Amino acid sequence: MANCWPKSCDSIEQFILLDPTLFLHLSMPVTICGASYHQPKKIYSNQDFFKEFPESIGASLEKTGVVSRAVADKSEVSSDLALAAAEKLIEQENIDRSRIGLLVYCSADFDYYTPATACVLHGKLDLPSSCGAMDLTLGCSAYIYALSAIKGMMETNGIENALLLTASTLTRLIHPKDRSNRFLFGDAGSATLISNKQEGSIGPFVFGTDGKGFEKIMVRDGYLRHPYTNASWIDRKDEFGNVTNDGSFFMDGLNVFLFSVRVVPKMIAEVLAKASMKQDEIDLFIFHQPNVFLNETLRKKMNIPEEKFVHCMDKFGNTVQATIPIAISESIRNGRLKPGMNVLLAGFGVGLSWAATIVRF
Amino acid sequence: MDTIREFITKVEKEIDGISPGTLQPATNYRDLPEWSSMHALVLIALAETDYNVTLTGEDLRGCKTVQDLYDVISKRTN
Protein backbone atom coordinates (compact mmCIF):
# COMPACT_ATOMS: atom_id res chain seq x y z
CA MET A 1 0.00 0.00 0.00
CA ALA A 2 1.46 3.39 -1.01
CA ASN A 3 2.20 5.98 1.65
CA CYS A 4 2.13 9.70 0.92
CA TRP A 5 5.45 10.87 2.39
CA PRO A 6 8.53 11.36 0.13
CA LYS A 7 10.46 8.28 -0.93
CA SER A 8 13.67 9.77 0.53
CA CYS A 9 12.18 9.26 4.00
CA ASP A 10 11.87 5.81 5.49
CA SER A 11 9.10 6.72 7.84
CA ILE A 12 6.58 9.35 8.71
CA GLU A 13 8.72 10.29 11.73
CA GLN A 14 11.71 11.12 9.48
CA PHE A 15 9.48 13.15 7.23
CA ILE A 16 8.19 15.21 10.13
CA LEU A 17 11.72 15.69 11.52
CA LEU A 18 12.82 17.15 8.17
CA ASP A 19 10.18 19.82 8.31
CA PRO A 20 7.98 19.81 11.43
CA THR A 21 5.67 22.49 10.00
CA LEU A 22 4.60 20.04 7.35
CA PHE A 23 3.02 18.01 10.12
CA LEU A 24 0.28 20.60 10.37
CA HIS A 25 -0.67 19.96 6.77
CA LEU A 26 -0.12 16.26 6.85
CA SER A 27 -3.14 14.43 5.65
CA MET A 28 -2.81 10.83 4.60
CA PRO A 29 -5.99 9.55 3.05
CA VAL A 30 -7.50 6.57 4.84
CA THR A 31 -10.33 4.23 3.98
CA ILE A 32 -12.04 0.99 4.97
CA CYS A 33 -9.91 -1.94 3.83
CA GLY A 34 -11.80 -4.90 5.31
CA ALA A 35 -14.61 -5.89 7.64
CA SER A 36 -15.68 -8.96 9.54
CA TYR A 37 -18.25 -9.98 12.15
CA HIS A 38 -19.01 -12.62 14.73
CA GLN A 39 -22.38 -13.85 16.00
CA PRO A 40 -23.08 -15.89 19.12
CA LYS A 41 -23.76 -19.60 18.52
CA LYS A 42 -27.35 -19.60 19.79
CA ILE A 43 -29.81 -18.84 16.98
CA TYR A 44 -33.38 -17.73 17.70
CA SER A 45 -35.35 -18.28 14.50
CA ASN A 46 -38.77 -16.97 13.52
CA GLN A 47 -40.08 -20.52 14.03
CA ASP A 48 -38.80 -20.41 17.62
CA PHE A 49 -40.46 -17.01 18.01
CA PHE A 50 -43.88 -18.08 16.70
CA LYS A 51 -43.78 -21.15 18.93
CA GLU A 52 -43.23 -18.86 21.91
CA PHE A 53 -45.76 -16.23 20.76
CA PRO A 54 -48.39 -18.15 18.75
CA GLU A 55 -50.79 -15.18 18.84
CA SER A 56 -48.39 -13.02 16.77
CA ILE A 57 -49.27 -12.21 13.18
CA GLY A 58 -46.49 -13.66 11.08
CA ALA A 59 -46.89 -11.70 7.85
CA SER A 60 -46.88 -8.42 9.72
CA LEU A 61 -43.70 -9.07 11.70
CA GLU A 62 -41.98 -10.57 8.70
CA LYS A 63 -42.19 -7.16 6.98
CA THR A 64 -39.24 -6.30 9.22
CA GLY A 65 -37.07 -8.64 7.14
CA VAL A 66 -35.71 -10.66 10.09
CA VAL A 67 -35.66 -14.43 9.61
CA SER A 68 -33.35 -15.38 12.46
CA ARG A 69 -31.08 -13.64 14.93
CA ALA A 70 -28.24 -14.77 17.18
CA VAL A 71 -28.60 -14.29 20.91
CA ALA A 72 -25.69 -14.17 23.37
CA ASP A 73 -25.86 -16.41 26.41
CA LYS A 74 -25.02 -15.17 29.91
CA SER A 75 -21.39 -16.19 29.70
CA GLU A 76 -20.80 -14.14 26.54
CA VAL A 77 -20.31 -10.37 26.87
CA SER A 78 -20.18 -7.85 24.03
CA SER A 79 -16.41 -7.51 24.05
CA ASP A 80 -16.10 -11.31 23.50
CA LEU A 81 -18.02 -10.88 20.23
CA ALA A 82 -15.84 -7.93 19.22
CA LEU A 83 -12.70 -9.89 20.07
CA ALA A 84 -13.79 -12.86 17.96
CA ALA A 85 -14.63 -10.55 15.05
CA ALA A 86 -11.22 -8.87 15.37
CA GLU A 87 -9.34 -12.19 15.37
CA LYS A 88 -11.32 -13.22 12.29
CA LEU A 89 -10.46 -9.95 10.52
CA ILE A 90 -6.75 -10.17 11.42
CA GLU A 91 -6.63 -13.63 9.87
CA GLN A 92 -8.83 -12.76 6.88
CA GLU A 93 -6.81 -9.64 5.93
CA ASN A 94 -3.46 -11.06 7.05
CA ILE A 95 -2.90 -8.04 9.30
CA ASP A 96 0.44 -7.55 11.02
CA ARG A 97 -0.60 -6.79 14.63
CA SER A 98 2.58 -4.77 15.21
CA ARG A 99 1.43 -2.26 12.58
CA ILE A 100 -1.91 -1.43 14.21
CA GLY A 101 -1.68 2.06 15.67
CA LEU A 102 -5.20 2.59 16.99
CA LEU A 103 -8.02 0.49 18.47
CA VAL A 104 -11.50 1.91 19.02
CA TYR A 105 -14.19 -0.13 20.76
CA CYS A 106 -17.69 1.10 20.15
CA SER A 107 -20.54 -0.25 22.29
CA ALA A 108 -23.00 0.45 25.08
CA ASP A 109 -21.63 -2.59 26.95
CA PHE A 110 -18.35 -2.44 28.83
CA ASP A 111 -16.49 -5.09 30.81
CA TYR A 112 -15.72 -2.81 33.77
CA TYR A 113 -16.57 0.60 35.18
CA THR A 114 -12.91 1.27 34.62
CA PRO A 115 -10.59 0.58 32.72
CA ALA A 116 -11.83 1.14 29.18
CA THR A 117 -12.78 -2.10 27.44
CA ALA A 118 -10.62 -1.04 24.49
CA CYS A 119 -7.57 -1.41 26.80
CA VAL A 120 -8.69 -4.91 27.82
CA LEU A 121 -9.15 -5.83 24.15
CA HIS A 122 -5.75 -4.32 23.31
CA GLY A 123 -4.14 -6.79 25.70
CA LYS A 124 -6.16 -9.78 24.47
CA LEU A 125 -5.33 -8.95 20.85
CA ASP A 126 -1.64 -8.64 21.73
CA LEU A 127 -1.32 -5.22 20.09
CA PRO A 128 1.86 -3.14 20.39
CA SER A 129 2.37 -0.60 23.19
CA SER A 130 2.49 2.17 20.56
CA CYS A 131 -1.18 1.45 19.72
CA GLY A 132 -3.73 3.89 21.15
CA ALA A 133 -6.98 2.45 22.52
CA MET A 134 -10.24 4.08 23.50
CA ASP A 135 -13.95 3.40 23.95
CA LEU A 136 -16.70 5.29 22.20
CA THR A 137 -20.27 5.09 23.49
CA LEU A 138 -23.16 5.64 21.14
CA GLY A 139 -25.81 3.50 19.47
CA CYS A 140 -27.00 3.16 15.91
CA SER A 141 -24.97 6.14 14.63
CA ALA A 142 -21.80 5.08 16.50
CA TYR A 143 -20.03 3.51 13.54
CA ILE A 144 -20.05 6.77 11.57
CA TYR A 145 -18.89 8.83 14.56
CA ALA A 146 -16.09 6.32 15.15
CA LEU A 147 -15.01 6.51 11.50
CA SER A 148 -14.74 10.28 11.81
CA ALA A 149 -12.74 10.10 15.06
CA ILE A 150 -10.45 7.43 13.62
CA LYS A 151 -9.93 9.29 10.34
CA GLY A 152 -9.00 12.44 12.29
CA MET A 153 -6.60 10.63 14.61
CA MET A 154 -4.98 8.69 11.78
CA GLU A 155 -4.56 11.60 9.42
CA THR A 156 -3.20 14.00 12.05
CA ASN A 157 -0.88 11.50 13.72
CA GLY A 158 0.37 9.45 10.80
CA ILE A 159 -1.23 6.21 11.96
CA GLU A 160 -1.03 3.51 9.33
CA ASN A 161 -3.77 1.07 10.43
CA ALA A 162 -6.66 1.20 12.87
CA LEU A 163 -9.13 -1.37 14.12
CA LEU A 164 -12.70 -0.31 14.77
CA LEU A 165 -14.61 -2.85 16.87
CA THR A 166 -18.32 -2.66 17.61
CA ALA A 167 -20.54 -4.99 19.62
CA SER A 168 -24.03 -5.29 21.03
CA THR A 169 -25.72 -7.81 23.31
CA LEU A 170 -28.87 -5.76 23.78
CA THR A 171 -31.08 -8.88 23.81
CA ARG A 172 -29.99 -9.41 27.46
CA LEU A 173 -31.92 -6.27 28.36
CA ILE A 174 -35.11 -6.94 26.38
CA HIS A 175 -38.07 -8.06 28.50
CA PRO A 176 -38.93 -11.72 27.72
CA LYS A 177 -42.52 -10.65 26.88
CA ASP A 178 -41.54 -7.68 24.69
CA ARG A 179 -42.60 -9.36 21.44
CA SER A 180 -41.71 -6.59 18.98
CA ASN A 181 -38.18 -6.07 20.24
CA ARG A 182 -37.56 -9.80 20.78
CA PHE A 183 -38.37 -10.18 17.07
CA LEU A 184 -36.28 -7.23 15.89
CA PHE A 185 -32.99 -7.36 17.77
CA GLY A 186 -30.00 -9.68 17.55
CA ASP A 187 -26.49 -9.76 19.03
CA ALA A 188 -23.19 -9.48 17.16
CA GLY A 189 -19.71 -8.04 17.15
CA SER A 190 -17.86 -6.53 14.21
CA ALA A 191 -14.34 -5.50 13.24
CA THR A 192 -13.26 -3.05 10.54
CA LEU A 193 -9.77 -2.33 9.26
CA ILE A 194 -9.08 1.29 8.34
CA SER A 195 -5.76 1.91 6.59
CA ASN A 196 -3.81 4.46 4.57
CA LYS A 197 -4.78 4.17 0.95
CA GLN A 198 -4.00 6.86 -1.62
CA GLU A 199 -6.96 6.06 -3.84
CA GLY A 200 -9.54 5.77 -1.06
CA SER A 201 -11.17 8.26 1.29
CA ILE A 202 -13.67 8.71 4.10
CA GLY A 203 -15.77 11.84 4.41
CA PRO A 204 -17.24 14.38 4.49
CA PHE A 205 -19.44 13.78 7.51
CA VAL A 206 -22.79 15.04 8.71
CA PHE A 207 -23.78 14.68 12.38
CA GLY A 208 -26.95 15.48 14.29
CA THR A 209 -28.58 15.03 17.68
CA ASP A 210 -32.02 15.49 19.18
CA GLY A 211 -31.13 15.22 22.86
CA LYS A 212 -34.67 16.09 23.91
CA GLY A 213 -35.71 12.76 22.42
CA PHE A 214 -33.34 10.68 24.60
CA GLU A 215 -36.22 8.79 26.23
CA LYS A 216 -37.49 7.41 22.91
CA ILE A 217 -34.98 4.55 23.05
CA MET A 218 -33.50 3.71 26.42
CA VAL A 219 -32.87 1.48 29.39
CA ARG A 220 -33.94 3.83 32.18
CA ASP A 221 -32.80 2.07 35.33
CA GLY A 222 -29.65 0.36 36.49
CA TYR A 223 -27.04 3.07 36.20
CA LEU A 224 -26.12 6.30 38.02
CA ARG A 225 -29.21 8.43 37.33
CA HIS A 226 -31.75 5.77 38.28
CA PRO A 227 -30.25 2.82 40.18
CA TYR A 228 -32.39 -0.33 40.30
CA THR A 229 -35.24 -0.28 42.81
CA ASN A 230 -38.20 -2.64 43.22
CA ALA A 231 -40.13 -0.30 40.91
CA SER A 232 -37.64 -1.08 38.14
CA TRP A 233 -39.31 -4.46 37.69
CA ILE A 234 -42.96 -3.38 37.58
CA ASP A 235 -44.20 -4.45 34.17
CA ARG A 236 -46.28 -2.29 31.87
CA LYS A 237 -47.98 -3.28 28.64
CA ASP A 238 -48.41 -1.09 25.56
CA GLU A 239 -51.55 -1.00 23.40
CA PHE A 240 -50.10 -3.76 21.21
CA GLY A 241 -49.39 -6.17 24.07
CA ASN A 242 -45.61 -5.65 24.33
CA VAL A 243 -44.39 -5.79 27.93
CA THR A 244 -41.45 -3.88 29.39
CA ASN A 245 -40.34 -2.17 32.62
CA ASP A 246 -37.84 0.51 33.67
CA GLY A 247 -35.07 -2.02 34.15
CA SER A 248 -35.45 -3.32 30.60
CA PHE A 249 -35.02 -1.94 27.12
CA PHE A 250 -37.71 0.39 25.83
CA MET A 251 -38.27 1.76 22.35
CA ASP A 252 -41.07 4.05 21.23
CA GLY A 253 -41.23 2.36 17.82
CA LEU A 254 -43.79 4.67 16.27
CA ASN A 255 -41.94 7.87 17.14
CA VAL A 256 -38.57 6.41 16.22
CA PHE A 257 -40.02 5.51 12.82
CA LEU A 258 -41.32 9.07 12.42
CA PHE A 259 -37.96 10.48 13.56
CA SER A 260 -36.13 8.38 10.96
CA VAL A 261 -38.45 9.41 8.13
CA ARG A 262 -38.00 13.06 9.12
CA VAL A 263 -34.23 13.07 9.63
CA VAL A 264 -32.62 10.57 7.25
CA PRO A 265 -33.58 12.00 3.81
CA LYS A 266 -32.46 15.46 4.95
CA MET A 267 -29.16 14.04 6.26
CA ILE A 268 -28.50 12.23 2.98
CA ALA A 269 -29.13 15.43 1.00
CA GLU A 270 -26.75 17.30 3.34
CA VAL A 271 -23.87 14.83 3.06
CA LEU A 272 -24.21 14.74 -0.73
CA ALA A 273 -24.18 18.54 -0.88
CA LYS A 274 -21.13 18.67 1.42
CA ALA A 275 -19.34 16.23 -0.92
CA SER A 276 -20.54 18.15 -4.02
CA MET A 277 -21.95 14.88 -5.32
CA LYS A 278 -25.25 13.91 -6.88
CA GLN A 279 -27.24 10.97 -5.57
CA ASP A 280 -26.61 8.96 -8.75
CA GLU A 281 -22.83 9.22 -8.20
CA ILE A 282 -23.22 6.94 -5.17
CA ASP A 283 -22.68 3.30 -6.09
CA LEU A 284 -24.10 1.75 -2.92
CA PHE A 285 -26.16 2.93 0.05
CA ILE A 286 -25.52 1.12 3.33
CA PHE A 287 -27.76 2.36 6.12
CA HIS A 288 -28.10 1.21 9.71
CA GLN A 289 -30.44 -1.80 9.63
CA PRO A 290 -33.31 -1.15 12.08
CA ASN A 291 -35.77 -3.12 9.93
CA VAL A 292 -36.36 -3.66 6.21
CA PHE A 293 -39.76 -1.99 6.27
CA LEU A 294 -38.37 1.32 7.57
CA ASN A 295 -35.39 1.23 5.22
CA GLU A 296 -37.66 0.46 2.25
CA THR A 297 -39.80 3.45 3.19
CA LEU A 298 -36.67 5.62 3.25
CA ARG A 299 -35.37 4.15 -0.01
CA LYS A 300 -38.66 4.81 -1.83
CA LYS A 301 -38.94 8.30 -0.37
CA MET A 302 -35.45 9.13 -1.69
CA ASN A 303 -35.90 7.33 -5.02
CA ILE A 304 -32.83 5.17 -4.50
CA PRO A 305 -32.79 2.24 -6.97
CA GLU A 306 -33.18 -1.18 -5.31
CA GLU A 307 -29.92 -2.45 -6.79
CA LYS A 308 -27.98 0.30 -5.03
CA PHE A 309 -29.52 -0.26 -1.61
CA VAL A 310 -28.35 -2.89 0.88
CA HIS A 311 -30.71 -4.80 3.17
CA CYS A 312 -28.89 -7.04 5.60
CA MET A 313 -31.36 -8.07 8.28
CA ASP A 314 -32.37 -11.64 7.55
CA LYS A 315 -29.72 -13.53 9.56
CA PHE A 316 -28.92 -10.77 12.02
CA GLY A 317 -31.83 -8.57 13.12
CA ASN A 318 -30.98 -5.11 14.41
CA THR A 319 -27.53 -5.42 15.97
CA VAL A 320 -27.29 -1.70 16.84
CA GLN A 321 -23.63 -0.56 16.46
CA ALA A 322 -22.79 -3.63 14.39
CA THR A 323 -25.35 -3.36 11.55
CA ILE A 324 -23.32 -1.17 9.17
CA PRO A 325 -20.02 -3.08 9.41
CA ILE A 326 -21.90 -6.38 9.07
CA ALA A 327 -23.60 -5.05 5.93
CA ILE A 328 -20.21 -3.87 4.61
CA SER A 329 -18.66 -7.28 5.28
CA GLU A 330 -21.55 -9.11 3.62
CA SER A 331 -21.54 -6.74 0.63
CA ILE A 332 -17.80 -7.29 0.08
CA ARG A 333 -18.29 -11.06 0.43
CA ASN A 334 -21.17 -11.26 -2.06
CA GLY A 335 -19.49 -8.94 -4.58
CA ARG A 336 -21.86 -5.98 -4.32
CA LEU A 337 -19.17 -3.75 -2.83
CA LYS A 338 -16.04 -3.43 -4.94
CA PRO A 339 -12.86 -1.32 -4.66
CA GLY A 340 -13.29 2.14 -6.16
CA MET A 341 -16.99 2.38 -5.28
CA ASN A 342 -18.49 5.42 -3.56
CA VAL A 343 -20.57 4.11 -0.66
CA LEU A 344 -22.87 6.26 1.42
CA LEU A 345 -23.09 5.11 5.06
CA ALA A 346 -25.83 6.39 7.38
CA GLY A 347 -26.60 5.65 11.03
CA PHE A 348 -29.62 6.84 13.00
CA GLY A 349 -31.41 5.94 16.21
CA VAL A 350 -30.74 5.95 19.94
CA GLY A 351 -29.76 9.36 21.29
CA LEU A 352 -31.60 10.43 19.30
CA SER A 353 -28.56 10.66 17.09
CA TRP A 354 -27.72 10.50 13.40
CA ALA A 355 -24.65 10.64 11.17
CA ALA A 356 -23.67 9.97 7.57
CA THR A 357 -20.54 9.84 5.47
CA ILE A 358 -19.31 8.82 2.03
CA VAL A 359 -16.55 6.23 1.78
CA ARG A 360 -14.51 5.65 -1.37
CA PHE A 361 -13.35 2.06 -1.03
CA MET B 1 -55.15 12.99 -4.26
CA ASP B 2 -56.81 9.61 -4.60
CA THR B 3 -60.49 9.14 -3.86
CA ILE B 4 -61.36 7.60 -0.50
CA ARG B 5 -62.09 4.30 -2.29
CA GLU B 6 -58.65 4.28 -3.94
CA PHE B 7 -57.06 5.14 -0.59
CA ILE B 8 -58.89 2.25 1.09
CA THR B 9 -57.74 -0.15 -1.62
CA LYS B 10 -54.13 0.85 -0.95
CA VAL B 11 -54.53 0.45 2.82
CA GLU B 12 -56.17 -2.97 2.40
CA LYS B 13 -53.31 -4.05 0.19
CA GLU B 14 -50.71 -3.00 2.76
CA ILE B 15 -52.36 -4.45 5.88
CA ASP B 16 -51.80 -8.18 5.90
CA GLY B 17 -54.74 -10.44 6.55
CA ILE B 18 -57.42 -7.99 5.44
CA SER B 19 -59.64 -9.04 2.54
CA PRO B 20 -60.65 -6.43 -0.02
CA GLY B 21 -63.90 -4.76 1.00
CA THR B 22 -63.27 -5.10 4.76
CA LEU B 23 -62.60 -1.40 5.33
CA GLN B 24 -65.23 1.31 5.08
CA PRO B 25 -64.69 5.05 5.59
CA ALA B 26 -66.29 4.75 9.05
CA THR B 27 -64.22 1.73 10.13
CA ASN B 28 -62.18 2.30 13.28
CA TYR B 29 -58.97 0.65 12.13
CA ARG B 30 -57.75 0.05 15.70
CA ASP B 31 -60.71 -2.31 16.20
CA LEU B 32 -59.50 -4.64 13.46
CA PRO B 33 -58.44 -8.00 14.91
CA GLU B 34 -55.32 -7.85 12.70
CA TRP B 35 -54.29 -4.40 14.02
CA SER B 36 -50.72 -4.28 15.34
CA SER B 37 -47.95 -1.74 15.96
CA MET B 38 -46.53 -2.64 12.57
CA HIS B 39 -49.74 -1.44 10.88
CA ALA B 40 -49.44 2.02 12.39
CA LEU B 41 -46.04 2.14 10.68
CA VAL B 42 -47.58 0.85 7.46
CA LEU B 43 -49.99 3.81 7.43
CA ILE B 44 -47.16 6.28 8.06
CA ALA B 45 -45.11 4.70 5.29
CA LEU B 46 -48.05 4.77 2.88
CA ALA B 47 -48.58 8.49 3.56
CA GLU B 48 -44.85 9.13 3.02
CA THR B 49 -44.27 7.10 -0.11
CA ASP B 50 -47.59 7.46 -1.96
CA TYR B 51 -48.68 10.94 -0.91
CA ASN B 52 -45.43 12.57 0.30
CA VAL B 53 -47.16 13.47 3.57
CA THR B 54 -45.38 13.13 6.91
CA LEU B 55 -47.83 12.05 9.60
CA THR B 56 -47.01 12.81 13.23
CA GLY B 57 -47.77 10.72 16.30
CA GLU B 58 -50.36 13.37 17.17
CA ASP B 59 -52.03 12.95 13.76
CA LEU B 60 -52.38 9.23 14.39
CA ARG B 61 -53.66 9.70 17.92
CA GLY B 62 -56.25 12.16 16.60
CA CYS B 63 -57.55 9.75 13.96
CA LYS B 64 -60.02 7.02 14.66
CA THR B 65 -61.55 6.08 11.37
CA VAL B 66 -60.23 5.52 7.89
CA GLN B 67 -62.06 8.71 6.85
CA ASP B 68 -60.22 10.73 9.56
CA LEU B 69 -56.91 9.50 8.24
CA TYR B 70 -57.86 10.19 4.63
CA ASP B 71 -58.91 13.73 5.58
CA VAL B 72 -55.58 14.47 7.32
CA ILE B 73 -53.60 13.22 4.32
CA SER B 74 -55.73 14.95 1.70
CA LYS B 75 -55.55 18.28 3.57
CA ARG B 76 -51.74 18.10 3.50
CA THR B 77 -51.59 17.25 -0.19
CA ASN B 78 -53.64 20.32 -1.16
Image: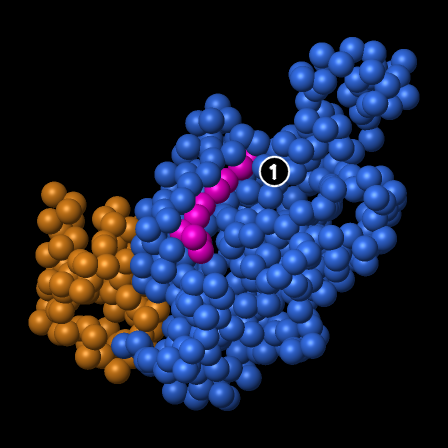
Chain colours: A blue, B orange
Residue A314 seen by the camera: no
Q: Quadrant of the N terminus of chain A?
A: top right
As rendered, which of A345 and A304 lies closer to the eye?
A345
**Residue at x-position 90% and y-position 21%:** A10
Residue A346 seen by the camera: yes
**Residue at x-position 14% and y-position 74%:** B28
Residue underneath mark 1: A149
- Of all chains, the one bearing label 1 is A
Can residue A350 be found in the magenta stretch? yes
Task: Say above or below: A162 vs B63.
Answer: above
Left-right relation of A32 to A59: right
Amino acid, disc 1: Ala
Chief secondary structure of the magenta span? strand
Q: Quadrant of the C terminus of chain A?
A: top right
Q: Position of residue A230 (x, y in %)?
A: 41, 82
**Residue at x-position 16% and y-position 45%:** B77
As rendered, which of A31 and A208 lies closer to the eye?
A208
Q: Position of residue A211 (x, y in %)?
A: 37, 49
Q: Position of residue A240 (x, y in %)?
A: 31, 77
Task: Say above or below: A90 vs A111.
Answer: above
Q: Position of residue A148 (x, y in %)?
A: 59, 37
Question: Could you say which quadrant of the image residue A217 lies in?
Answer: bottom left
SS for tag 1?
helix
Can residue A228 be found in the magenta stretch? no
As rendered, which of A119 and A291 lies closer to the eye?
A119
**Residue at x-position 67% and y-position 33%:** A153
For the magenta stretch, what is the residue range? A349-361
